[in-house]
């Protein structure tokens, strides 16, 4: 059965009770991230040296576009909706936390393994052939940008049972408290100069947005007027925070040497989440009716079926295209970033990257749907250990790249793989073979 036939069959079998808008927003938000990355990245030769320039850096007029292009809040909103449903279903099955978390980690982390293996071998080969370690590090850092978000999301997902319980018991008060804590962390990190404290907001900012998804799942976000009012309030609050400072206009990180709204996340991303959620949820009714069309819904299923592969590999495809162009003498890399010619070339650039991404989807897409896990329920500490080790390793890889002058970043590479093995996330196929032999 072809993937298109299977997708159409899945579309026809979708129960009427499913909120298709959740799936649509997941596919749409990740697609915006992918095209945003491709659009912002500008590679060019400067004095004979290949450099990668963020097109937002020198074009402040584009910074307001990030209020729409920074869609990670929507992905966490959708994640909260989905994880609430998943954990409640596990409770009905009387499935313990360890088994539930292991299943979530298999879906989220197993697709990362091929990415790490390919980049490990690729970086080792490049270094062995004398390629400048700085270029290898730059390329790997660019390609592995997606894993910082994945590490954060995995950590937030691990806290789902407790954050959901807080929502069920305290309602909106629980979100107000975590939002206030996020604001206090900003005050300590920015106002008092304790910069390390800001990293706590990876949990408090994104955890609050994730909990907003619980409110949506429980239909406690009001009707259209209330949703529109929340969106306007979020937009006004975001504008006020930017105007009063020290928060910049851009909602994505541009210059690591200055205050950014996303690295680590600030309360501006909470107000932005309120703005985006209010606007998008106000058209939920229209969108759900629009998605009743079988072809539109099938297209949504098709994208979601490979969404993790798209997300993880889209920047590797871009690095590969830039490297190929550099080897060929730099066709197209002579255009100055943000020049009229550069902007006119963007449709061709994005088309080339789409084509370059297709082989990665064909080869690695199957890892997105792991085999059913029939193993006994694990002790809780094992998947928790997997979360700790994987998040630590992925964070280090996103920050420092996969290699430097001293060779491969062995510790950062080992931690996620060790977490998957020691945490029992991998190995389901081996267990099935062992049971079959017995």
Image (tube, rainbow, N blue to C red):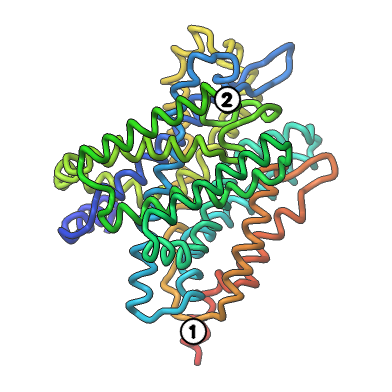
Residue at disc 2, secondary structure:
loop
Tell whether 381 sits left or right of 105: right
**Closer to us: 265 or 387:** 265
Residue carrying label 2? 245
Whole-percent x, y for residue 342 in the image: 51, 12
Tell whether 251 sits left or right of 135: left
Quarter of the rendering occupied by the N terminus:
bottom left
Identify whether 214 is placed above or below 30.
below
Query: In which image quadrant can residue 13 be found?
Result: bottom left
Task: Please give the name of the residue rendered at 38% of the width and 39% of the height, measured from the top-left corner.
Answer: 274
> What numbered label is drawn on residue 179?
none
Query: In which image quadrant can residue 276 be found?
Result: top left
Categorize mark 2 by other alpha carbons within 10 Å: few (<14), some (14-19), many (20+).
few
Residue carrying label 1? 376
Whole-percent x, y for residue 263 in the image: 61, 38
Identify whether 169 is placed above or below 176.
below
Whole-percent x, y for residue 415 in the image: 70, 60
Identify whether 2 is placed above or below 232.
below
Q: Nearer the viewer, mark 1 or mark 2?
A: 2
State which tag comes first along the sequence, 1 or 2.
2
Task: Please give the name of the residue rendered at 55% of the width and 37% of the height, measured from the top-left corner.
Answer: 315
Q: CA distance from mark 1 to mark 2?
A: 53 Å
């Amino acid at each position: 059965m072809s993937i298109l036939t299977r997708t159409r069959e899945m579309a026809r079998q979708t129960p009427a009770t499913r909120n298709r808008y959740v799936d649509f927003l997941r596919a749409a938000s990740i697609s915006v991230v992918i095209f945003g990355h491709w659009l912002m990245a500008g590679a060019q030769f400067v004095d004979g040296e290949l450099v990668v320039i963020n097109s937002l850096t020198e074009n402040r007029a584009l910074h307001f576009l990030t209020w729409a292009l920074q869609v990670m809040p929507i992905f966490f909103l959708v994640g909260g909706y989905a994880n609430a449903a998943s954990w409640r279903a596990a409770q009905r099955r009387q499935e313990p936390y360890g088994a539930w978390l292991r299943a979530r980690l298999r879906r989220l982390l197993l697709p990362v393994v091929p990415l790490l293996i390919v980049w490990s071998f690729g970086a080792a080969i490049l270094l062995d052939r004398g390629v400048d370690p700085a270029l290898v590090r730059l390329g790997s850092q660019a390609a592995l940008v997606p894993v910082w978000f994945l590490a954060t999301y995995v950590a937030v997902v691990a806290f789902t049972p407790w954050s959901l319980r807080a929502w069920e018991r305290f309602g909106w008060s629980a979100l107000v408290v975590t939002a206030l804590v996020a604001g206090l962390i900003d005050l300590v990190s920015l106002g008092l100069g304790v910069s390390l404290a800001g990293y706590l907001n990876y949990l408090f900012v994104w955890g609050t947005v994730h909990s907003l998804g619980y409110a949506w799942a429980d239909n406690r976000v009001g009707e259209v007027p209330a949703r529109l009012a929340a969106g306007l309030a979020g937009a006004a609050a975001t504008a006020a925070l930017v105007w009063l400072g020290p928060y910049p206009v851009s909602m994505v990180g541009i210059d690591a040497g200055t205050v950014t709204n996303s690295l680590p996340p600030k309360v501006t991303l909470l107000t932005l989440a309120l703005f985006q959620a209010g606007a998008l949820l106000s058209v939920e009714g229209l969108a759900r009716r629009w998605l009743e069309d079988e072809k539109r819904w099938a297209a949504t299923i098709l994208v979601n079926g490979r969404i993790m592969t798209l997300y993880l590999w889209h920047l590797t495809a871009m690095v590969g295209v830039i490297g190929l162009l550099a080897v060929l003498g730099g066709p197209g890399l002579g255009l100055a970033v943000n020049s009229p010619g550069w902007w006119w070339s963007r449709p061709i650039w994005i088309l080339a990257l789409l084509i370059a991404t297709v082989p990665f989807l064909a080869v690695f897409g199957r890892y997105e749907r792991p085999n059913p896990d029939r193993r006994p329920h694990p002790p809780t500490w094992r998947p928790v250990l997997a979360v700790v080790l994987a998040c630590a390793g992925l964070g280090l890889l996103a920050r420092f790249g996969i290699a430097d002058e001293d060779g491969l970043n062995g510790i950062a590479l080992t931690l996620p793989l060790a977490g998957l093995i020691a945490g029992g996330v991998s190995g389901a196929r081996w267990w099935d073979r062992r049971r079959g032999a017995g």
